[in-house]
Image: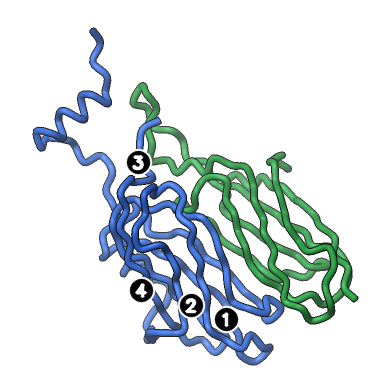
Amino acid sequence: MTIQRRDCLTWLSALGLAPHSIAFASPDQAKLAIQTLVGDKIVQTGRVILDIPPLIENGNSVVMTLQVESPMTQQDYVKSVHVLAEGNPLPHILSAYFTPRSGRAQVMSRVRLAENQRVWAIAQMSNGSFWRGYADTLVTTSACTEER
Amino acid sequence: MTRPLRTIVTVPPKATRGQLITVRALAQHPMENGFRHNENGQRIERDILTDFICLYNSIEVFRAKLHTGIAANPLIEFNTLAIESGELSFEWRDGDGLSTIAKARIEVV
């Protein structure tokens, strides 16, 4: 009988001995990534609506809709939106760059979520101000690190 | 260099001037995040699409940076204003700089 790595890890983790080979991003890492984005600017709360289902069965493909309230004119529009996850191996998920010709600052995509976590969305407006929103999710089947 | 990926883009064929249209772009790609291991315990190399760019008659209207947190076969849905008849071009680039381009026509009345 051959011992599979998978079985081995399962038993080890049952005994509380599993090696933590993948370091998950901590909330601190996501905060650091946000800090890098915004610099010393103040991030205001609001205007950003991040829509992720509150309960997710499979973290491998989660529909995420992101909308930023803005008139989207030449003088006042959303420049970019960055999505950052607190509980993924790497915090960055997606950055979207809009133009006044976008008409509406909205983007939808499918994302991976590794565990129960808070996902942040940080928007930068054309006047340089930053706004944020977040979504909390519960994930039953993790993405990212499952074996093939 | 080009990398042939299977892509599907959905653009309304007709629109009125100034109308907000919704555009969907899908590419077939594993978005291998580099954290997984195969059955022999070897790490699978990272292979992701990193950039997505949409041009409307050669003018950039939308761009996105994709990271490891994007699911396999990345789908991106966004909006743009129908300004004039012409062509929308969609480009995906991977970490090695290889790209795939898809195009769609729109008639604006």
Question: SS class of the residue under badge 2?
Answer: strand
Q: Amino acid at mark 1?
A: Val
Colour of chain B, in one word, is green
Q: Quadrant of the N terminus of chain A?
A: top left
Image disc number at residue A123: 2
Name the residue tied to disc 1. A78
CB contact under 8 Å: marks 3 and 4: no
Which amino acid type corresponds to the residue marked 3 in the rendered image?
A: Thr
Q: How far apart are labels 1 and 2 at the CA level?
A: 7 Å
| Chain identity of mark 1 | A
Q: Which mark is residue B31?
A: none
Q: Quarter holding the C terminus of chain A? A: top left
* Tag in front: 3 or 4: 3
Q: Secondary structure at mark 1?
A: strand
Q: Position of residue B25 (x, y in %)?
A: 67, 55
Q: Where is residue A99 shown, x and y percent of the image?
A: 66, 77
Q: In this rendering, do the residues under marks 1 and 4 share a single chain?
A: yes
Separation of marks 1 and 4 at Cα, in angstroms = 19 Å
Of A44 and A62, which appears nearest the observer? A62
Q: Residue at x 30, y 58 (%)?
A: A138
Query: Which one is closest to the eye, mark 1 or mark 4?
Result: 1
Mark 1 is surrounded, within 10 Å at the Cα level, by few (under 14), some (14 to 19) or many (20 or more) other residues, namely many
Question: Which residue bears the numbered disc 4?
Answer: A35
Quarter location, residue B42? top left
Vertical position of residue A77 compared to residue B42: above or below: below
Label placed on residue A145: 3
Task: Tell me which colouring the rendered structure shows.
Answer: by chain
Residue at 60 percent across and 47 percent down: it is: B94
Estimate the spatial distance between the alpha carbons at disc 3 and disc 4, rounded to whole Å. 26 Å
- Are both tags, 3 and 4, on one chain? yes
* Mark found first going from the N terminus, 1 or 2: 1
